Image (spheres, helix red, strand yellow):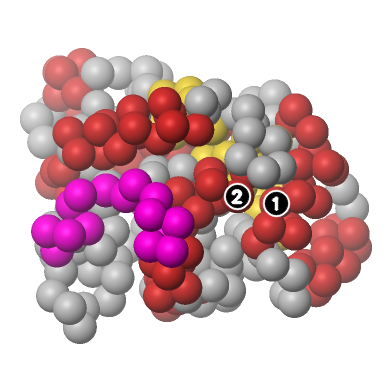
Amino acid sequence: MLTTEIQKYAERFESASPFEILSWASETFGDELAIVTSFQVTGIATLHMMQRIKPRTPVLTLDTGLLFPETHDLMNTLEARFNLDLRRIKPRQTPAQQARDYGDRLWERNPDRCCHIRKTIPLRDALAGFKAWITGLRRDQSPERAATPIISRDARNGAIKIAPFANWSEELVWQYIRERDLPYNRLHDMGYPSIGCWTCTKTARGDDAPRSGRWSQRGKTECGIHVALPSILESDIKA
Ligand code: SF4
């Protein structure tokens, strides 16, 4: 897809609904479209809408080996309820192998590198063969995400990236979930607004930023899937 086409669609999608954008993505990319989700609430709304568009669209989720049991429960529930084509993407190394090669609790000493090993590289490998992927990024999630385009070129993964819910608010997504009585991660009701690996996720107070519980006090706000981390050189990583 040419850059001028991407710009044209980016403008058009500003006034389109997520359902319209997802329908367009499915028609345009067919079997070469994947949904990437960590089963946050926007991902659940995405999966629900896709049931009316193309229910067996491949769903990729990064199973880092360090997810909460509640997240696995939700994955299993949604996989069964929607008959998902769910692909649990695992890192090349188990947590024990990573500890052997990089030392114990790498997420405390070098979380950028840990995310690179357990998330960024596995996603890049999993997206080979797909021309486009859907993400649940929203502009209201953090200042770093405030300018998220609805469609963009993801040069690092060689694909088009589509964020159909970029201009939805958290409140709107929760309204969508509650009106349809959709399952969601039980941890949300225990004070976790955003949920990743148990090793790097904390609760947040009601007035805290939605992603404030992620890597809190580690000077990090993104895992590296959506933005390149300057501290990471791929040549540094043992595969
Ligand atoms: S969120 Fe934490 S444990 Fe999970 S991959 Fe990133 S640094 Fe490692």
* 174 sits left or right of 5 in the view: left
Name the residue located 36 percent from the left edge and 23 percent from the top edge.
Answer: 91
Q: Residue 32 in the image: x percent, y percent?
A: 74, 30
* 85 sits left or right of 210 in the view: right
Name the residue located 70 percent from the left edge and 51 percent from the top edge.
Answer: 22
2 or 1: mark nearer the eye: 2
Residue 144 vs residue 87, the one in the foreground: 87
**Amino acid type at image mark 2:** Met
Name the residue located 18 percent from the left edge and 52 percent from the top edge.
Answer: 187
The residue singled out by tag 1 in the image is 22
Q: Is residue 65 above or below residue 131?
A: above
The residue singled out by tag 2 in the image is 49
Marker count (numbered): 2
Q: Residue 94 in the image: x percent, y percent?
A: 24, 18
Q: Quadrant of residue 88?
A: top left
SS for callout 2: helix
Residue 157 vs residue 78, the one in the foreground: 78
The residue segment tinted magenta is: 177-191
